Image (spheres, rainbow, N blue to C red):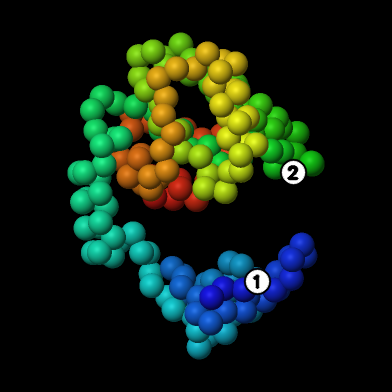
């Protein structure tokens, strides 16, 4: 398993039994600045190019009912808080409300699939529901499917902050 050294301080070392990465070890160390035990580091390369992932993607995409039918907007929603105090930007919750207000005139014509971050807690889900209600947003659903699959048939994908999901879309 993966164990990070430290708690609130920047991690200088990653202790692990095995660490699966997509970068060669030297590139991983250079990118993260972390010391890694070479004996337990496994470089798989770009996993999404592997034949088994490609087969899974095409099988899942063909049978996933939520993405079949008319076009939709795919909304990746991963944060409601304030990113950093030194950034002069609105909170994720404020950006959600602004985005829903902008998209609201189209919501009767095109549905929206909202993918919440898996770590969202009950309070965050309540705040998302409140924003949907306050803006009068209709014709939406929540879906926890794989972001790459959810994005595959979308008319377009939107997110207010960066998400690792965007690497595969």
Q: Which residue is mark 2?
A: 84
Residue for point 29% across, 26% down: 71
Can you tell which quarter of the image residue 128 is in? Answer: top right
Residue for point 70% across, 69% down: 11
Which circle's residue, 1 or 2, is located before the other in the chain?
1
Q: Where in the figure is residue 53, as x and y percent of width and height?
A: 28, 60
Q: Which residue is mark 1?
A: 4
Q: Where in the figure is residue 19, as x and y percent of width and height?
A: 50, 75
Name the disc covering residue 56, or none.
none
Q: How many marks?
A: 2
Can you tell which quarter of the image residue 61 is in? Answer: top left
Residue for point 32% across, 45% down: 149
Name the front one of labels 1 and 2.
1
Whole-angstrom CA distance, mark 1 to mark 2, is 22 Å
Q: Which quadrant of the rendered structure holds the C terminus? A: top left
Let me know if residue 132 appears in the view.
Answer: yes
Q: Where in the figure is residue 1, as x and y percent of width and height?
A: 54, 75
Secondary structure state at the residue bearing disc 2: loop
Q: Residue furthest front?
A: 122
- Specify whether 152 is left or right of 32: left
Let me know if residue 157 appears in the view.
Answer: no
Question: Callout 1: few (<14), some (14-19), or many (20+) C-alpha neighbours within 10 Å?
Answer: few
- Specify whether 147 is left or right of 77: left
Question: Callout 2: few (<14), some (14-19), or many (20+) C-alpha neighbours within 10 Å?
Answer: few
Secondary structure state at the residue bearing disc 1: strand
């Amino acid at each position: 398993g993966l164990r990070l050294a430290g708690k609130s301080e920047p991690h200088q070392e990653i202790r692990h039994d095995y660490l699966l990465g997509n970068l060669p070890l030297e590139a991983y160390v250079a990118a993260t600045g972390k010391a890694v035990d070479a004996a337990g580091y496994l470089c798989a390369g770009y996993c999404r190019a592997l034949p088994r992932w490609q087969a899974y993607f095409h099988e899942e995409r063909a049978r996933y009912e939520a993405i079949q039918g008319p076009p939709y907007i795919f909304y990746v929603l991963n944060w409601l808080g304030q990113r950093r105090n030194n950034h002069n930007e609105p909170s994720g919750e404020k950006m959600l409300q602004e985005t829903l207000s902008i998209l609201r005139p189209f919501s009767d014509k095109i549905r929206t699939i909202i993918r919440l971050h898996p770590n969202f807690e009950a309070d965050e889900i309540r705040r998302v529901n409140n924003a949907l209600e306050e803006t009068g947003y209709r014709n939406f659903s929540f879906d926890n499917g794989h972001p790459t699959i959810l994005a595959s048939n979308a008319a377009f994908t939107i997110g207010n902050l960066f998400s690792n999901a965007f690497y595969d879309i």
